[in-house]
Amino acid sequence: MKDFISQVNGLPLILKIILCIPVLEIFYGICRVINGAAKNDVLWILLGVLTIIPGAFFMWVLDLVWVIVKGHAFLLGDTYLG
């Protein structure tokens, strides 16, 4: 599972920005849950689930900024805000 997250973080910047479109944003939410499962951390999984359905309306803006500034989507780094 960590390989999958590494591959997602290794995508070209333009593809990461396209994945921030509101309808496609669910992909990053699923990646957050997978990242939490790979780390065996309940908080990561809970935050990932909360960003899939209720957070999909505002997370695309946060992810867009995060991808442009840090190079990966929110909660897909090594730390919570990394």
Image (spheres, helix red, strand yellow):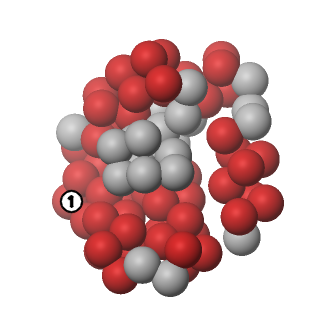
Coordinates of residue 59 in the picture (x, y in percent): 29, 41
| Residue bearing mark 1 | 54
Residue 50, visible in the rendered structure: yes
Frontmost residue, 44 versus 18 = 44
Q: Is residue 76 left or right of residue 62?
A: right
Residue at image position (30%, 32%) is 62
Q: Secondary structure at mark 1?
A: helix
Q: Quadrant of residue 8?
A: top right
Q: Amino acid at mark 1?
A: Pro
Quick check: 23 above or below 20?
below
| In the image, residue 44 above or below residue 76 | below
Q: Is residue 67 left or right of residue 11?
A: left
Residue nearer the viewer, 35 or 24: 35
Q: Nearer the viewer, residue 21 or 68?
A: 68
Q: Quadrant of the C terminus?
A: top left
Q: Nearer the viewer, residue 81 or 23?
A: 81
Say whether residue 58 is left or right of residue 81. Answer: left
**Quadrant in which the N terminus is drawn:** bottom right
In the image, is 38 to the left or to the right of 51?
Answer: right
Against 26, residue 73 (above or below) is: above
Residue drawn at x 60%, y 75% is 38
Tell me where residue 66 appears, x and y as whole percent: 40, 28
